[in-house]
Amino acid sequence: VFPPSGGGVGAGGAGGRGEVEQLRHEMLVQRREYQRRIDDLELDKRQLEAERDRLAASTKQLQQALDSAQSARTKDTQDRTDVVRATEALRSENARLRKELSAALDTRLAHLRQPAVSVEQYRALLA
């Protein structure tokens, strides 16, 4: 098929070379644009990975703080339980000692209320 303007094969070939150069130029521009997009995406990827690493470190610190707080709470609860038990034991011991002291005082008072010498013995001594 020949071009209608009579330029022959040479004229058609020159037009083809211009189109090829234009396509090459467009492909080069497109390639540069794709490379720029790839570079941007790689930068975004690196930034996201850095953010992920920061978040992972922060999460680890928060988990450690939570574990520490839970451990302290458990220890505090155990300490409170120990204090309650110790308080109950002290109250029980205090009640037992009060009973013993009361019984000892009652016994002592009973001895003090009884005269060492009966009235008859005292009269006999005076006579």
Image: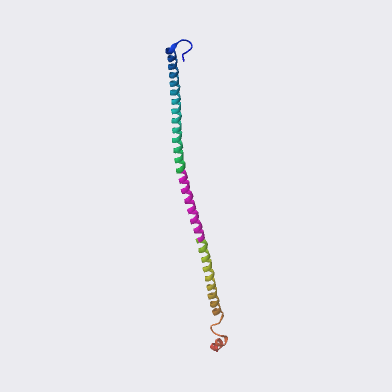
Q: Residue at coordinates 45% horizontally, 35% vertically from top-left?
A: 45
The x and y percentages for residue 10 are 42, 12
Q: Nearer the viewer, residue 25 or 108?
A: 25
Q: Nearer the viewer, residue 99 or 42?
A: 42
Instruction: Name, please, the residue furthest toward the top.
Output: 6
Query: 21 above or below 105?
Result: above
Q: How many marks?
A: 0
Q: How is the image coloured?
A: rainbow
Judge from the rendering whether residue 64 lies leftward or rightward of residue 121; answer left or right: left
The x and y percentages for residue 88 are 53, 65
The x and y percentages for residue 115 are 55, 82
The x and y percentages for residue 6 are 46, 10
The quadrant holding residue 57 is: top left
Query: 125 above or below 30?
Result: below
Does the magenta segment cover residue 68?
yes
Secondary structure mostly seen in magenta is helix
Q: Quadrant of the image for the C terminus?
A: bottom right
Q: Residue at coordinates 44% horizontally, 11% vertically from top-left?
A: 8
Query: 121 above or below 84?
Result: below
The quadrant holding residue 40 is: top left
Q: Residue at coordinates 46% horizontally, 29% vertically from top-left?
A: 37
Does the magenta segment cover residue 125?
no
Query: 114 above or below 7?
Result: below
Q: Which residues are magenta?
A: 58-81
